[in-house]
Image (cartoon, grey):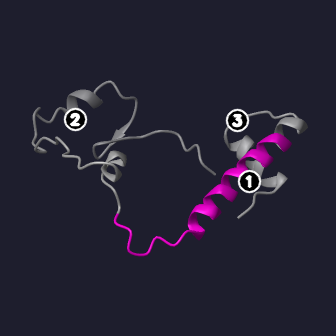
């Protein structure tokens, strides 16, 4: 996957950025470089490789110290949303920002 200059212009517009032509060209080169790295990584055969829970697990056994997932505070949604300008069915309402 490679981006085009039009893609960079659209992304800059969505991010509310004004890029000069040389900045836009540099962004295009850098982002396409990232995509090239991802494609190289996808090309590696990982069949039979177990995922690591922690990067250091490749070197030595790691025991993750995770605590139990238990509720530690009461539900205060209504109190927290009292100062919000708009709330509907427990959700904050915000202006649409994505095309």
Q: Position of residue 33 (x, y in %)?
A: 72, 51
Foreground disc of the pair 2, 1: 1
Residue 96 x %, y %: 55, 44
Q: How many marks?
A: 3
Circle 1 residue = 32
Residue pictured at 68% horizontal, 43% vertical: 14
User: Along the polypeptide, which appears first: circle 2 or circle 3?
Assistant: 3
Give above or below for 82 relative to 41: above
Task: Write the start and end of the magenta stretch as one range.
Answer: 25-50
Of 99 and 41, the residue lying toward us: 41
The image quadrant where one finds the N terminus is: bottom right
* Secondary structure found at label 2: helix
Residue ID at (42%, 40%) = 93
Is residue 26 within the magenta segment? yes
Give the SS element for disc 3: loop
Residue lying farthest to the right in this orientation? 21
Tell me the distance, in whole angstroms, between the alpha carbons under discs 2 and 1.
43 Å
Instruction: Check if mark 2's residue and mark 3's residue have beta carbons within 8 Å.
Output: no
Q: Which residue position is annotated with label 3?
A: 16
Q: Residues within 10 Å of mark 3 (few under 14, many from 20)?
A: few
Residue 41 is drawn in which quadrant? bottom right
Residue 19 found in image quarter: top right
Q: Is residue 83 magenta?
A: no
Q: Position of residue 20 (x, y in %)?
A: 87, 34
Q: Quadrant of residue 78?
A: top left
Per the model, the C-alpha gap separating discs 2 and 3 is: 32 Å
Residue 63 visible, this orientation = yes
> Dot 1: what SS?
helix
């Amino acid at each position: 996957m490679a981006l085009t200059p039009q893609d960079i212009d659209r992304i800059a517009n969505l991010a509310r950025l004004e890029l000069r032509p040389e900045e836009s060209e540099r962004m295009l080169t850098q982002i396409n470089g990232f995509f090239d790295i991802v494609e190289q990584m996808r090309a590696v055969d990982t069949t039979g490789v177990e995922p690591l829970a922690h990067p250091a697990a490749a070197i030595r056994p790691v025991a993750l110290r995770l605590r139990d997932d238990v509720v530690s505070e009461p539900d205060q949604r209504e109190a927290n949303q009292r100062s919000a300008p708009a709330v509907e069915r427990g959700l904050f309402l915000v202006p649409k920002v994505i095309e």
